[in-house]
């Protein structure tokens, strides 16, 4: 008999939770039952899933009895509060927040990059930061081709990274701007429509903000390269969905030829090379939105450094940058029989 799993989604009504729900509905998954969890204000809502109306229940410490896999996308505070209760109840937690990413006891996984790390989990696995995931999808195949010494990345991050309410704010501000109405700022500290600004996370004494620090430390952890040189600049841009990144990659030794670099990227699962110089067609967030693949292009020599290459990428922050990556982690857990409790 095929083993089936009892699944819960914590944060089921949010942007990422909605994508988890869609992935479970549309893709093959051995699902026995599904529990939708959210804050108290969402209790009473009903969400259609595979022709059924499922109720939204309040997320509490007692929500996970009988659950095998729990997808968490309810914020770091709720993850810290409720993930331990989920593991105590026997569930494996796949957490999309930053709560456990740098915990040495918690695997931080991009399935195409470090799938074997799922095997040493102790009940919680962490989904990396969205920008880190997108970066690693282009960086990992090149690091396998030839050791990388240094990475310089500049991100252009969509409103989707701040959730469904931020996406609505961008739409509402754009409409207000075009109609001449006052701009209302509630989610972002600055106007997002027709503007861009430094990622609005806390800046420490180094001058780096939290998002930039995540990219540095998470990249090293995922690649198992604690001394890899990484620097990041993270910018919020008025794009609804899908992040973009400009990346400069310096190799430790002789840089592989561009053809070998293109082949390594094109052959890596989850990457699509979009690099049409003749027609000036390269990755765009509009094209990446709703796609599973990361689009990579602008692959070219760094004319300032013989050991470096430049490239540009775009990827859906809600999909591969969040829900799809977590879903793929669950698939590996099932494939490798790494879920604690086996359901009948």
Image (spheres, helix red, strand yellow):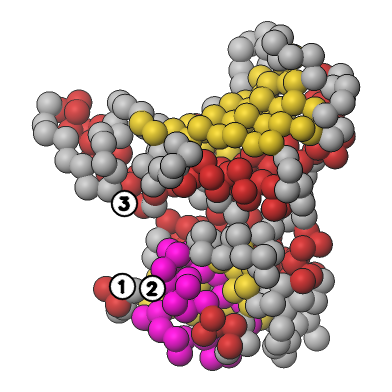
Q: Which mark is residue 165?
A: 3
Q: Earlier in the sequence, mark 3 or mark 1?
A: 1
Q: Position of residue 216 (x, y in %)?
A: 61, 43
| Residue at 51% over, 32% down | 233
Looking at the rendered structure, the secondary structure element under dot 3 is: helix
Residue 261 vertical placement versus 343 (above, below):
above
The residue to which callout 2 is attached is: 38
Mark 2 and mark 1 in contact? Answer it, CB < 8 Å.
yes
What segment carries the magenta color?
57-83
Name the residue tied to disc 1.
42
| Of the pair 270 and 113, the residue shown nearer to us | 113
Name the residue at 29% across, 31% down. 193
Quarter of the figure that contains the C terminus:
bottom right
Which mark is first along the chain, 3 or 2?
2
Viewer-proximal residue, 99 or 262?
99
**Residue at (34, 74) in percent of width and height:** 39
For label 3, count other residues whose C-alpha is less than 10 Å away and answer few (under 14), some (14-19) or many (20+): some
Camera-nearest residue between 326 and 223: 223
Q: Is residue 243 shown above or below 46?
A: above
């Amino acid at each position: 008999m095929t083993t089936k799993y009892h699944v819960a989604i914590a944060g089921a009504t949010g942007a990422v939770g909605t994508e988890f729900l869609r992935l479970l509905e549309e893709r093959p998954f051995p699902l026995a039952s599904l529990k939708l969890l959210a804050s108290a204000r969402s209790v009473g809502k009903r969400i259609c899933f595979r022709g059924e109306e499922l109720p939204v229940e309040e997320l509490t410490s007692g929500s996970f009895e009988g659950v095998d896999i729990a997808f968490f996308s309810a914020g770091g505070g709720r993850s810290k509060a409720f993930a331990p209760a989920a593991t105590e109840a026997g569930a494996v937690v796949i957490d999309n927040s930053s709560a456990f990413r740098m915990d040495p006891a918690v695997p931080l996984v991009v399935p195409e990059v470090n799938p074997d790390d799922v095997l040493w989990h102790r009940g919680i696995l962490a989904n990396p930061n969205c920008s880190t995931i997108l970066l690693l999808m282009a960086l990992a195949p090149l690091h396998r081709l030839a050791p990388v010494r240094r990475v310089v990345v500049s991100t252009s991050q969509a409103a989707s990274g701040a959730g469904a309410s931020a996406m609505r704010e961008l739409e509402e501000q754009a409409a207000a701007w075009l109609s001449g109405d006052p701009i209302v700022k509630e989610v972002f500290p600055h106007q997002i429509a027709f503007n861009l600004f430094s990622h609005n996370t806390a800046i420490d004494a180094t001058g780096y903000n939290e998002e930039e620090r995540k990219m540095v430390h998470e990249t090293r952890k995922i690649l198992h390269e604690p001394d890899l040189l990484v620097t990041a600049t993270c910018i919020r841009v008025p794009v609804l969905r899908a992040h973009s990144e400009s990346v400069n990659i310096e190799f430790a030794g002789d840089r592989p030829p561009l053809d070998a670099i293109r082949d390594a990227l094109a052959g890596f699962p989850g990457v699509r090379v979009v690099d049409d110089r003749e027609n000036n067609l390269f990755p765009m967030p509009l094209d990446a939105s709703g796609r599973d693949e990361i689009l990579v292009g602008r692959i070219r020599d760094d004319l300032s450094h013989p050991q470096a290459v430049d490239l540009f990428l775009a990827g859906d922050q809600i999909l591969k940058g969040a829900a799809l990556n977590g879903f793929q982690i669950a698939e590996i857990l099932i494939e490798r029989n790494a879920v604690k409790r086996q359901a009948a």
